Amino acid sequence: MKLAYQQAAAEDYEAINQKLEKKDSLEVLKWAYQAYGDDIVYACSFGAEGMVLIDMIYKVKKEAAIVFLDTDFHFKETYELIDQVKQRYPSLRIELTKPGLTPAEQAEAHGSELWKVNPDLCCKIRKLIPLEQELNKYTAWMSGLRREQSSTRANTQFVNQDQRFQSIKICPLIHWTEEEIWMYINLHQLPYNSLHDRNYPSIGCEYCTKPVQKGEDPRSGRWANTNKTECGLHQQG
Ligand code: SF4
């Protein structure tokens, strides 16, 4: 059964999720690509979960569409990893999508350090609007969210009605623990961002990501010293 955002009701999501309840991530992926074919895109941030999901996607759909929100502010290690992934999975259609404003244009319009004075606006310009434009091309999208990552992600289902982007959001990794992610990466010798070995468990833009000390919340290095915890891609409403 294929859901489309405009037609589906809450009961339809419930029914699909009940059907998928006992399935593993690979089976959820198979369902997703069977239902949506080329009409689904994986929005990948190239974190540890992304490496697992890309490896699994490649097993199911060799020419899958993957999009990376290239804010122009990522670490050089992230761009190096993307090159490695492209070499390892050559048939995947990996695209880097850019914001409407270059860093210089943004500085001219909003000041030179918008991420400090108004990170929500900066994320809106450099992530939310580009993702919205990208998702308009597809019926559904995929994310590597895991339930244990944060309280805001604890109720994520395999298949979610995404009100923010008026889309269907599929999250095949909801049940995975961080330990299982790393076991998979090591077992399959997958490439990963070398910053993970330097106390960066969650990696975003260079300006907004700090290393995290042992025992701290893995996401506490994102927008450290602010109330911001999410860039807005995974908020509902
Ligand atoms: S994470 Fe920081 S630098 Fe990146 S888009 Fe958001 S506010 Fe701007």
Image: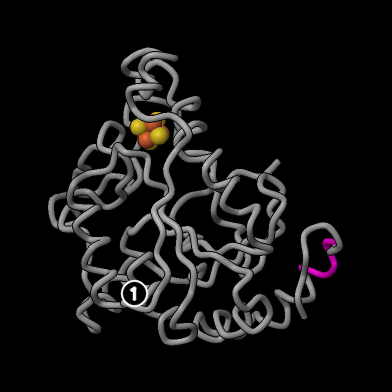
Label 1 CA crowd tier, 10 Å (few <14, some 14–19, many 20+): few
Locate residue 167 relative to residue 79 in the image: left or right: right
* Residue receiving disc 1: 180
Question: Where does the image place residue 5, in percent across and percent down from the top left?
Answer: 77, 59
Question: Where does the image place residue 143, in percent across and percent down from the top left?
Answer: 51, 61
Q: How many marks?
A: 1
Locate residue 206 relative to residue 168 in the image: left or right: left
In this rendered view, identify the residue nearer to me: 95 or 180. 95
Task: Report the residue at 24% width, 49% height from top.
Answer: 215
Q: Which quadrant of the render holds ligand 1?
A: top left
Q: Which quarter of the figure has residue 54?
A: bottom left
In this rendered view, identify the residue nearer to me: 201 or 29. 29
Magenta stretch: dominant secondary structure: helix
Q: Is residue 31 above or below residue 74?
A: below
Q: Is residue 209 magenta?
A: no
Task: Report the residue at 37% width, 65% height from top.
Answer: 49
- Write down the region rendered in magenta: 9-13
Question: Where does the image place residue 23, in percent across and percent down from the top left?
Answer: 59, 85
| Amino acid on which disc 1 is placed | Glu
**Mark 1 residue element:** helix
